[in-house]
Image (tube, coloured by chain):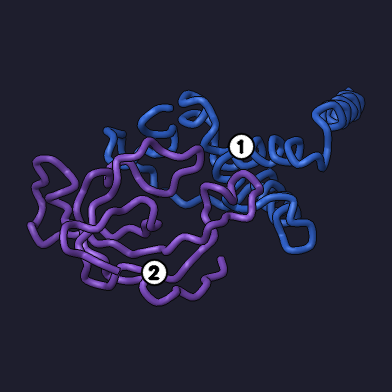
Chain colours: A blue, B purple
Amino acid sequence: MTERKVNDIGGLPAGPVCQDEHPSTLHEKRVDAILRILSGPKLEAFSVDAMRRAIESNTEEDYRNLGYYDKWIRAVRDLIIEQQVLSRDEIEARVEQLREKHKKVAA
Amino acid sequence: MTAFAIRPGQALPVGASVRVRKHPPEQHCRTPFYLRGIEGEITDVMGCFRDPSLLAFHKPGLPLRVLYRVRFKQADVWPNYSGSPKDTVVADIYDHWIEPLAGEKA
């Protein structure tokens, strides 16, 4: 096991922190809503601790490059598969369905 | 996060001097790397909580862990710290991550 995990970066050299505010995008709001519905008291599909653990299991490269909400939605996907809420195949099938739908709309 | 009561004699007192352990990190670890091996002082005993390193794997999080608020001198944490010697950093640390220095007892 390594000494420190990918998220444990306190004190390491880094560039300046961007502190600009920006309004939340629709995608970000949706990710937030999905997380809250799944982890909320009604479903309790997983805990905030499990969510953090899933985010921390990214590779160093993904952890650095993925956006905040992209890490969230990937972690949600991994956890609902782990907790057998949905299977990987079910998720892939639905994504494919939505891709086809968007292709038709765009055409 | 539900806090559970602390049993008499279970926790170190406020003011106790402690050192952060140098364990390898758990798969989900709440103790930052930069504090490992650093000595500090307990400023608060927050209560007993389910263990997040186990909750992270959908387990009940038992045994419960005492959560301490610990204050460290910045000059002890960072080599060549250039700020005031009075500067401190405060972190929440679970009991299995700290050891009492000589003479400190629950």
Mark 1, chain letter?
Answer: A
Residue A94: quadrant of the picture: top right
Q: Residue at x 69, y 44 (%)?
A: A27
- Nearer the observer, disc 2 or disc 1? 2
Looking at the image, residue B10 sits to the left or right of residue A13; the answer is right
Mark 2, chain letter?
Answer: B
> Which sits in the foreground, B75 or A97?
B75
Q: Percent position (x, y) of residue B38?
A: 21, 48
Dots 2 and 1 on the same chain: no
Q: Percent position (x, y) of residue B65?
A: 46, 60
Would you say residue A106 is visible in this rendering? no
Residue B40: quadrant of the picture: bottom left
Mark 2, Cα crowd under 10 Å, few <14 / some 14-19 / many 20+, is few
Residue A88: quadrant of the picture: top right
**Secondary element at image label 1:** helix
Mark 1, Cα crowd under 10 Å, few <14 / some 14-19 / many 20+, is some
Looking at the image, residue B79 sits to the left or right of residue A34; the answer is left
**Is residue A62 positioned above or below B34 on the image?**
above
**Is residue A79 positioned above or below B97 on the image?**
above
Q: Quadrant of the C terminus of chain B?
A: bottom left
Q: Percent position (x, y) of residue A32?
A: 66, 51
The answer to whether the residues at label 2 and label 1 have Cβ atoms under 8 Å apart is no
**Secondary element at image label 2:** loop
Residue type at mark 2 is: Gln
Give the spatial CA distance, label 2 vs label 1.
42 Å
Residue type at mark 1 is: Asp
Question: Which residue is the site of mark 1?
Answer: A70
Q: Residue at x 46, y 40 (%)?
A: B26
> Which sits in the foreground, B82 or B89?
B89
Question: Which residue is the site of mark 2?
Answer: B10
Q: Percent position (x, y) of residue B1?
A: 56, 65
